[in-house]
Amino acid sequence: MSAIETVSEQRCFGGTQGFYTHVSEACGGPMKFAVYLPPAAENGPVPVLWYLAGLTCTAETFTIKAGAQRVASELGLALVMPDTSPRDTGIAGATGDWEFGEGAGFYLDATEAPWDQRFRMYSYVVDELPRLVQERFPFDMGRQGICGHSMGGHGALTLALRNPGRYRSLSAFAPIVAPTNVPWGQKAFPRYLGDDKKAWRKHDATALVADGARFNGSILIDQGEADNFLVNQLQPQRFETACEDAGQALELRMHPGYDHSYYFIQSFIEDHLRHHAKALAA
Ligand SMILES: N[C@@H](CCC(=O)N[C@@H](CSC=O)C(=O)NCC(=O)O)C(=O)O
């Protein structure tokens, strides 16, 4: 595991917004990530909220567009924003398609060549990056939450469901809840994971809940009703039904007029941060 190099650090709401890079073992090359440290971090370890972004996004997208730092500062919550995939992989077919490859890592460890060499975002986000950041930043790793948007919402749900006890709070904006049943997953999963759909189920939040996985707490999901991807790609009712059948606590809030953009995320990010801060209170 290589050292973290600082790209930039700037004062923000009394804390520090930083961008960093390091060489990742899991992803076989350089990776970028962002961290917001609230002012409370000057006095001791603070709880950590992981934010996983969607297709086409980088570590900058949420950091710049969501407007999360003001409330994170107030709540004493650190934010960590990983990139959405390895970059500059040189793998044929890894660029040029916004739904697959670079910028579209789907928070899984690919098992199919050539993707299995670099596209290992599950191990990166669950294992490598937490070990790295806890050495550098004053994080209370006993108080971690996870949130994400769209492909990153899929990441947040599947990582939390697969790692009981790791994350004490869970929320998502417009998540892909059933990738095995929608075009985004049906396009990416055969290439990353092969054709055996049994292997896809542990990367599908709805299938995970149906197969017995649970999150110990209530899951918050916000979804815009004017989201262009709602009917074809997102289908939150699939997850809602699975949670109802399983007795998994879920608050799914539908918002008329809101689309898939960061204007939607900006509008509700404060609710999510407060949801996490409440669950992560010491
Ligand atoms: N280029 C695409 C649109 C891509 C897009 O909307 N990406 C979303 C995430 S979609 C699911 O993971 C996003 O977060 N974009 C970043 C942003 O700043 O909005 C197209 O042509 O439709």
Image (cartoon, grey):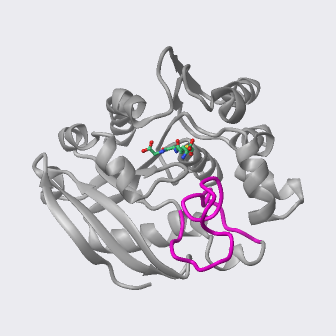
What is the magenta segment's predominant secondary structure? Answer: loop
Q: Which residue range is magenta in the image?
A: 85-111
Q: Given the current orientation, which residue lies at the most extreme right position?
A: 196
Per the image, is 107 magenta?
yes
Residue 209 in the image: state x and y as whole percent: 73, 39
For residue 71, side relative to residue 2 (left or right): left
For residue 10, side relative to residue 249 (left or right): left
Q: Image point 34% across, 33% down: which residue? A: 266
140 relative to 206, above or below: below
Residue 128 in the image: state x and y as whole percent: 49, 73
In depth, the one of 258 and 277 nearer the eye is 258
In depth, the one of 259 and 70 nearer the eye is 259
Would you say residue 282 is visible in this rendering? no
Q: Given the current orientation, which residue lies at the most extreme bottom position?
A: 2
Residue 208 in the image: state x and y as whole percent: 74, 44
For residue 188, side relative to residue 141 (left or right): right
Quadrant including the N terminus: bottom left
> Quadrant of residue 219 in the image?
top right
For residue 192, side relative to residue 85 (left or right): right
Per the image, is 74 magenta?
no
